[in-house]
Amino acid sequence: MILDNSTTKAQEYYTYPRKLENYKWFKPILTMLLTAVFYVIFIGVLTAISMLLVSGSGSDPKDFIEAMSGGYDTMDVYSAPGALASLGTLGVFIPALFLAIKITKERPIASIHSSRGGWNNRFFTRAILIALVVNALPQIIIAAVEGGFKNFEIRYTVAGFIVFLIFLPLQCMAEEYAFRGFIGQTLGAWFKNPVVPIIVSTICFMVLHGYNGIGQFGIFVSGLVFAMGAWYTKGLEVGCASHIVNNWFTFFLSGIGVSRTTADVDIPGLIVDIAVNLAFIAGVIILDKKFHWFSEE
């Protein structure tokens, strides 16, 4: 399967699969089924490795399982088995999806990265810079104002931090490829309209995050910003960048004891989340309009 002549001109991201040669409406269903099979296999392997690491460390596997099933409040991304179980089991969605697409030949993998012909490192780097200013910096400032740095305590093991560094970006990108990429583009191709995938994929994204009601609304706003970023820039780089920076600093600050992760979000926290997300997408649009940061040059 090859890209048609639309590779010379960027297309709308969500409906893009319809413009690909040999597009068939049913192929995403086959891809989804194969992805699920590979995903279960990969999760099984990582879970087995995690349990072996727990047993080898002398810890009680029951305590580990209980902690991992306790949601964000007890989530362990600081030890190697914890990071593998928490982050790795999401991150392996990417190879599962890519392997399935290779088999079904549904579309070129490059078309999931973007409708511009593939992944753009320049867009990704620039989005990282914006996210560091509007997302990471506020997290650090809030932690400092609330006195969190007085409780500084490194919770990471060496192996745990290495696994965290590897799998945290993959976990964030996997969610972007799952919701904005596969689900979003499939719905966009089926309904021939970007509005449906933006709304539906965002709702799916919200439902699958275990926060309280206030927190879920914040997740909805985050998902909507990621989805709009994919639509505006015609690719996943911007959403991946924002997602990675947000999660990395959230878990890192928790890992050094200056803040904590929790499923119970309050109103002030929601306001901050919404402000950060709106600032990010505004920064993307403004810098693109003024300096063409996210336009093909």
Image (tube, rainbow, N blue to C red):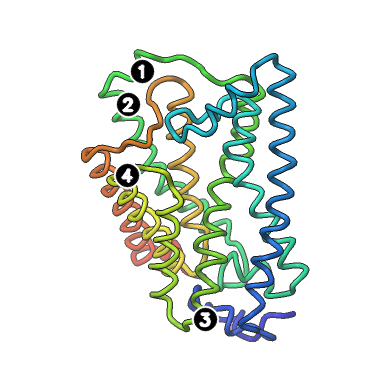
Residue with the mark numbered 1:
149
Label 4 belongs to which residue?
215
The alpha-carbon separation of the residues under discs 3 and 1 comes to 50 Å
Residue 32, percent from left and from top: 64, 66
**In the image shown, does 65 or 206 lie closer to the viewer?**
65
10 Å crowding of disc 2: few (<14), some (14-19), many (20+): some
* Number of other residues with Cα within 10 Å of mark 4, as a class: few under 14, some 14 to 19, many 20 or more: many
Q: CA distance from mark 2 to mark 4?
A: 19 Å
Where's residue 151, x and y in %? 38, 14
Residue 145 image-quadrant placement: top left
User: What is the CA distance from the residue labelled 3 to the residue labelled 2?
Assistant: 45 Å
Which residue in the structure is indicated by mark 2? 143
Which mark sits nearer the N-terminus, 4 or 3? 3
Mark 1 element type: helix
Check disc 3 and report the residue beneath it: 190
The extreme front residue here reads 62
Residue kind at label 2, given as amino acid type: Ala
Measure the C-alpha gap from mark 4 to mark 1. Answer: 24 Å
- Against 66, residue 248 (above or below) is below
Q: Quadrant of residue 28?
A: bottom right
C-alpha separation, residue under disc 2 versus residue under disc 1: 7 Å
86 with respect to 1 (left or right): left
